[in-house]
Image (cartoon, rainbow, N blue to C red):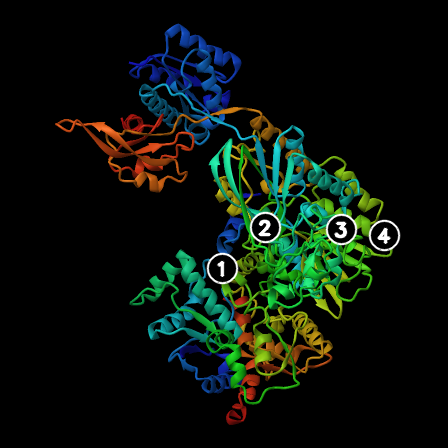
Amino acid sequence: MSFEEKEMAENIKRISGVNPRKCMKCGKCSGTCPAYEEMDYHPHEFVAMVEKGRIDELLASKSIWTCLSCFACVERCPRSVEPAKLIEAVRLEVIRAQGANHLKAVQIPELLDEKLPQQAIVSAFRKYSK
Amino acid sequence: MQRIGVFVCWCGTNIAATVDVKAVAEAARKEPGVVFATDYQYMCSEAGQKLIRDAIAEHKLTGVVICSCSPRMHEATFRKTVEAAGLNPYMLEVANIREQCSWIHKDRTEATEKAVVLARTAIAKVSLNVPLTAGESPVTKRALVIGGGIAGIQSALDIADAGYEVDIVEKQPTIGGKMTQIDKTFPTLDCAACILTPKMVDAAQHEKITIYSYSEVTEVTGFVGAFKARIKRKARFVDETKCTGCGECTSKCPSKKNKNEFNLGLDNRTAIYIPFAQAVPKVAVIDAESCIKKKTGKCGLCQKICGAGAIDYEQKDEYIEREYGAIVVATGYNPIDLAKYDEYAYSQSPDVVTSLELERLMNAAGPTKGTLLRPSDGTHPHTIVFIQCVGSRCDDARGKPYCSKICCMYTAKHAMLIREKYPDTEVHVFYIDVRTPGKNFDEFYRRAVEQYGVDYIKGMVGKVVPHDGKLLVQGSDLIANEQVRIEADMVVLAAAIEPDKSARSIATMLTASIDTNDFFTEAHPKLRPVESPTAGVFLSGVCQGPKDIPETVAQASACAAKVIGLLAKDKLKGNPCVAHVNEEMCNGCSTCEKVCPYGAITYQDKEFRVPGPKRTEIRRVASVNEAVCQGCGACTVACMSGAMDIKGFANKQIFAEVDAICR
Amino acid sequence: MTFSYYPGCTLKTKAKDLDRYARSAAAALGVEMAELPEWQCCGAVYPQAKDEIATKLSAVRALMAARDEGRELLTLCSACHHVIKRVNHDMVSDENIRTKVNNYLKPEVPYTGETKVIHYLEMLRDTVGFDELAKRVTRPLKGRRIAAYYGCMLLRPGNVMGFDDPENPRIMEDFIRAIGAEPVVIAYRNECCGGYMTLENRALAQKKATTVVDAAASAGADTIVTACPLCQYNLDVNAVGERVPVLYFTELLAEALGVKEAEA
């Protein structure tokens, strides 16, 4: 692991409060994930890749935008690793950079429909923008 | 003034790498009373012990300090060494400069400094040591075995074969334990009942063995060689001496819808029942909670038809008290309650079963007579998913942190048996690791895969959803890196095992220690694996840690060997480090009597000389039963007049140690 | 009994039904819901990062306001309940977050998580009692087969939410029984509906919502009830194929208590 990789991994661990070393590589998180099919890197890979310092690939992954934050992986992990927190931390690394918002206000009108609750918009902003 | 010798051990590099042993010996030499100090590579070796013996003779030593590993490790060894050289064994002190010093420090200067202080402390103490002589107590030549599973039975048989009396106390109506519920055993696939029931019969017929079934140990007092146990014989409402086990009553009993414990609730039994055909003793028992006569006073059918006149609705719990020289704990295990793991839908679908339930579903004496059928609708399952490690290896509030050890093998067995008997069945096993360290174990598992075509999937199941009579299993295949979905007819969960719930209360009763998982702790994890740290208490089977049947039987026999070794002695040397009363100072307040956990202190009226015309007076003073006292020291701290002391750990010795540390 | 009440944004706009039926039903049950005089949007998702402080402040303000009123805080929307309950847990258990939040807000009395956060369903179960509720029902929903959809937010993580068994909950089924209907336990009742993904990846939300509604339809449910506006939206709008009406549980409650028309 290069120095940069190590530093990035440490940062993700600090933001998330997750210790990927607790993982016993059972794959239950990915077994239970409802967004699995939409992801390029899956929950168990997030844990393994943060451990190995492969953050660059995760920063560019599709998965950080498709995690539903349903906490199924958090609830069911037998080692209390909490993969969802890692995914959130990687996403924050992206959107905390200036101009890197994934969802912009101008996009909203076209996404609206009559019934769409505010909650959806607020959630999406919280998840995708800073 | 004592003539003290100090011996500093290197323990190879264990101590010497972190502690400057020569400097410790050097510093010790300057302490008052020390006439000789040296260091050596392995003090516990024969050469090391000879060095000590020679030094005692040459320098006329009266006290010895060994700076080495923990006294738990070698104190007994070194006591023998000094005794061989003519010293009283209690004129020895061990300063622990390994576990409490070299192993926990990294800095050599700091560690050496601490080792010097520890040596100094032991020297200060040994200066005040006085020779002590251990008392002797007789050994009751009978053993108590708590738990009548395969572990308890094997221990009992071995002890009895050596010629000693053994009582087995089993809380269930029959002995046999979990193994009675198992269908076949790995890796040989012989039938569990075929190998267990002869042993159960042997135990019952052995002239030296008494079985107290449907009984519980409620109280234990005393100490090694002289335990006293109170055993509750629960009322079974059937006279054990009269019942012939004909089973007539069980076929006529009108209360039929009661959960059958033997088949894990998969079918029902009558209120009066015999757990299973090979039960030992083969005697009926009435479950008072479901007996119509016991509940309403009406019925009494079983009494009317019993040809032996064995039914007694008025039977009461009885208590017996017996003395034992040794106690074997063989309390066993249970699978954990899976209600907390309902992502696998155990409490939502009857077709999600535990592995033990599957044993019953495959057993000829089980609820389906040995044909594997789905509990929900009685149809043949065609796709079966096994999930490993349910509740094992967990770091959450729900499960257990340890590997349950037996699941990999019994799952391979189940998968293999199903594929053999029903070749049209698809069998998938989700696993994290397959752990097969045992003779012919890995070969067995490979046979399941290669010969029987069991589909092993590396990954865990995330969720089981009961839907439309099927079980939708969604899990990880980590090798293929995909999420797999299987529509299963049955799901079998390899539930973690945990010590029987009685472990905690029995440990308390015996003052034996248990770990954070309620497994009994052994006296030494490697060198004394079948003994509890509490003298006279021995461990057999899964109560000490997860084990399969061969390991359990091996440990049970090892445990029996230790018990036989104890019972073979006529007398036991006690611990001389017991409480001692200074009668001149005792004011008879009874405080010590109240705090003593062993009931070792009583009070006596004694005549003492006093100045003045009366010459004598009668005073009430404490008296210690040295055979009962365990030397815990509770009385010494409770005594307000300072009259109580522990021999070998007198207050002035402790203070001398504190002074030496603070100097 | 009086609770401080946190309605949340969506209940003031698209999910008015969830709110108004809750109020009329509570009135009928003798429970007073005192809406907090000032409240801000909770943020709708719980910020999981250890270093997120600002995004937790609005929840703390609501918690603190309830404490100052000396009352328990009642919530209704699943998302609000989730956010407020978890932030409260942080205020109890995470010293770093607690210190920074208090340093920032500078309240007269520092807030350390003393407010009890109660969901409306918990209030029905624990304060009113389902047995008592059943007695108060004037128009039992006889013959109705109702499926409860819990979603994620009320249940997980179970050790923080403490709402019900996260894998096999029963509170909504007990509720359905109390209002005289027959609960239909359905597959996927605690699996995600698609959530906010409807904005990013509508196809995914459709897939998730459809699975749930299909399960309810094949189990023969005539209605699905939920406590979450976003779940209601996804199941109602995004599910394709067979449809089952998706209502807020409060609407059925008001109906069973005979106070629905008074509202409408």
Residue B564 in view: yes
Please give left or right for residue A79 compared with residue B283 in the image: left
Q: Chain of mark 4?
A: B
The chain that hosts pointer 3 is: B
> What's the chain of the residue with tag 2?
B
The disc placed on residue B394 is: 2
Q: Are marks 4 and 1 on the same chain?
A: no
Number of disc labels: 4
Task: Please tell me which residue is depicted at 49% across the width and 20% down the height of the picture.
Answer: B77
Q: Position of residue B545 (x, y in %)?
A: 60, 41
Tell me the quarter of the image containing the C terminus of chain B.
Answer: top left
Q: Are marks 1 and 3 on the same chain?
A: no
Which element type, helix, strand or loop, lies under badge 4?
A: helix
Q: Sequence-wise, which precedes: disc 2 or disc 4?
A: 2
Q: Residue at x 38, y 18 (%)?
A: B91
Residue B577 drawn above or below residue A29: above
Chain-order first, disc 4 or disc 3: 3
Name the amino acid type tagged 4.
Lys
- The residue where tag 3 is placed is B277
Q: For the residue marked with disc 3, what is the amino acid? A: Ala
> In the displayed structure, would residue B522 be above or below residue A51?
above
Rendered location of residue B327, percent (x, y) = 55, 36
Task: Point out which mark residue B421 bears.
Answer: 4
Front tag of 2 and 4: 4
Residue nearer the viewer, A5 or B485 = B485
In-image side of B258 versus B503 (left or right): right
On the image, numbered disc 1 is attached to which residue?
C49
In space, the residues marked 2 and 1 are separated at their CA atoms by 24 Å
Three-letter amino acid code of the residue under disc 1: Ala
Evaluate whether label 2 is on the same chain as label 1: no
Q: Are marks 4 and 3 in contact (CB under 8 Å)?
A: no
Residue B238 x/y as whole percent: 65, 54
